[in-house]
Amino acid sequence: MENNHKKTGRRDFFKIAGIGAAAATAAFYGCKSKPSAGGITVSGEVPTGRMTYRTNPHSGDKVSLLGYGCMRWPLRKNANGEEEIDQDTVNELVDYAIAHGVNYFDTAPVYVRGWSETATGIALKRHPRDKFFIATKMSNQRADPPRTLASGMEMYHKSMHDLQVDYLDYYLLHSVGMGGIAELRSRFFDNGLLHYLLEERRAGRIRNLGFSYHGEVEVFDYLLAQDIQWDFVQIQLNYVDWKNASGWNTNAEYLYNELRKKNVPAVIMEPLLGGRLSRLPAHSLALLKQIRPEDSPASWAFRYAGSPENVLTVLSGMVYMEHLQENIRTYSPLETLGEQEYAALEKVTELMLHSDFIPCTDCQYCMPCPYGIDIPGIFTHYNRCVNEGNIPKDAQDENYRRARRAFLVSFDRGIPKERQFSHCIGCSLCSWKCPQRIPIPENMERLDKLVEQLKQG
C-alpha cells in the first residue's frame, strides 16, 4: 500500500486548518498543574459553556469538537467475581460530559466485549434525546461469509434496541479497507446491505451515513468515487500519522484532503495514537514544555487533531474523569496550532520515528487471544518502558542494573504470568486483524528473548 500520496507542507497545513501561518502562540489557561492518577495533567477549573462546536454541512448538526469514544468503558467485578461494565461510573462520566458541552457519543456492537451499546444506551436514556448524537456501526467485519442482508439487518436493529433509540444520528460501515475491495463488496454491496442502509437514511432512521477506514487505500478511494453523498467519514489522524502512517493506515494528509475536496466532514480517531502521544519521552516533552510549560502532551495532540476546519469531532475513549476534564479544557474553547507549535511537533515526530516503539494503539482488534495472552497490555507496557528509558540495552551502561530491575519487576506486576508472551505459539491469528499491521508473533518472540536475557543477566 502506498502511503505517500500528495504531500502537504507546513504552510499548506495552516491553510487546511484555517489559521494564519504566523499565528501567535499564547499562554494556555495559566494555572498550575498536577499529574493525575491516569497520567494526564490536570490544571485549573473545567469551563462550562465554552465548548467548541463544528457544523455538519449535510445535516446542520452542531457537534462538539470533543467526541466521546465508548470503546473502553470502565469495568468492575460483580458479586460472582466476573467482570462487567461499571454502569455507575459510565453514568457519571456521561452526565459530566453532557453538562460540559460534549454531545457526540461513538460506540459499536463489538466494543467492550459487546457490552458498550447497552451501557451507553442506559447512560444516555437519562437525558433528553436532543442533548446528544449517537454514532454506532455495522460491525459485520468479523462475521463469517456469507455476510447476508438478514444478518446485517439484525445487527442494525439490535443496535437501536440496545441504545434505546428509534433513530441513529450517525451510522458507519465499520472498519472498511481491511481485506481490500473484495471484502468490502462481500460485506456491503453483493448482499444489498448498503442499499438497505441508504433506504434507512431516506426514511430518516439513519440521520447521517458514513464509514470508518483502516486498510487498503483503494477501498477509501472506491467508496468516495461512488454516487453516494457520504455525510461524514472517520479516519485516523494525529501528528505522527499525518505524513508517517504505518501498517494498514494511510497518511492522514491524503485522507483528509480527499474528504475536503468532497465536502465530507472528518471524524477523527486515534488522536493520541493509542495513548503513545500522551506519554512522550523526556527529550520530546522538553521540546513542547519550552513553548507551553503548563500543557500536557495529550493537550498538544488534541489541539493538532482539532485544528483543521473540516474536522467535525475528535474521539477520545475517556475512562477516567481526569482524562475527560483535561480534554474538555483543551476544546473549551480550542486554541488552534501556531507555526512554532507545528514545527515542534514535527521534531517530536522525527524523534518518535527513530525510537523502539511498537506501533500498537490498544484498539483490541487482536483480542481475544486463544491462548490468553494480553497482547495490547504487553505492548503498552513495553512502550511505556521505552518512554521512561527502562529498556536495558548495554550491560556496560551505568543505568543497566536500574533499568533491568525496573523492566522485569514492573512487567511481572503489570501482566499476569499466564497472559505473558511466553505463551505465544506463533499462530498469527492476531496479525491479520491488526490495523497497524504489527507482526505480533515476531514481537512476542523478541520480547520473550529480551526478558530471558535480562533474567540471566
Image (cartoon, rainbow, N blue to C red):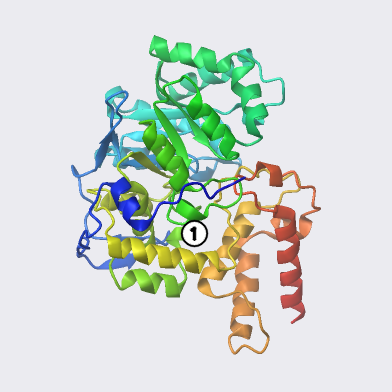
Residue 345 x, y percent position in the rendering: 39, 63
In the displayed orientation, state which residue is furthest to the front: 6
Q: In this view, does 279 lie above or below 328?
A: below
Task: Name the quadrant of the C terminus.
Answer: bottom right
Seen from the viewer's position, the closer of residues 79 and 447 is 447
Seen from the viewer's position, the closer of residues 363 and 227 is 227
Element class at badge 1: helix
Q: In this view, does 264 lie to the left or right of 250?
A: left
Residue 17 x, y percent position in the rendering: 30, 48
Residue 113 x, y percent position in the rendering: 59, 36
Asked if one can make out residue 164 in the rendered structure from this viewpoint, the answer is: yes
Residue drawn at point x = 73 percent, y = 65 percent: 446
Q: Is residue 420 left or right of residue 84?
A: right
Task: Name the quadrant of the N terminus.
Answer: top right
Crowding near pointer 1: few (<14 within 10 Å), some, many (20+)? many
Number of on-image labels: 1
Residue drawn at point x = 40 percent, y = 70 percent: 285
Residue drawn at point x = 34 percent, y = 60 percent: 342
Residue 200 x, y percent position in the rendering: 45, 13
Asked if one can make out residue 87 in the rendered structure from this viewpoint, the answer is: no
Q: In this view, does 83 lie to the left or right of 262?
A: right
Instruction: Give the quarter of the image for residue 344.
Output: bottom left
Q: Is residue 304 left or right of residue 447?
A: left
Q: Which residue is labeled 1 in the image? A: 276
Q: What residue type is labelled 1?
A: Arg
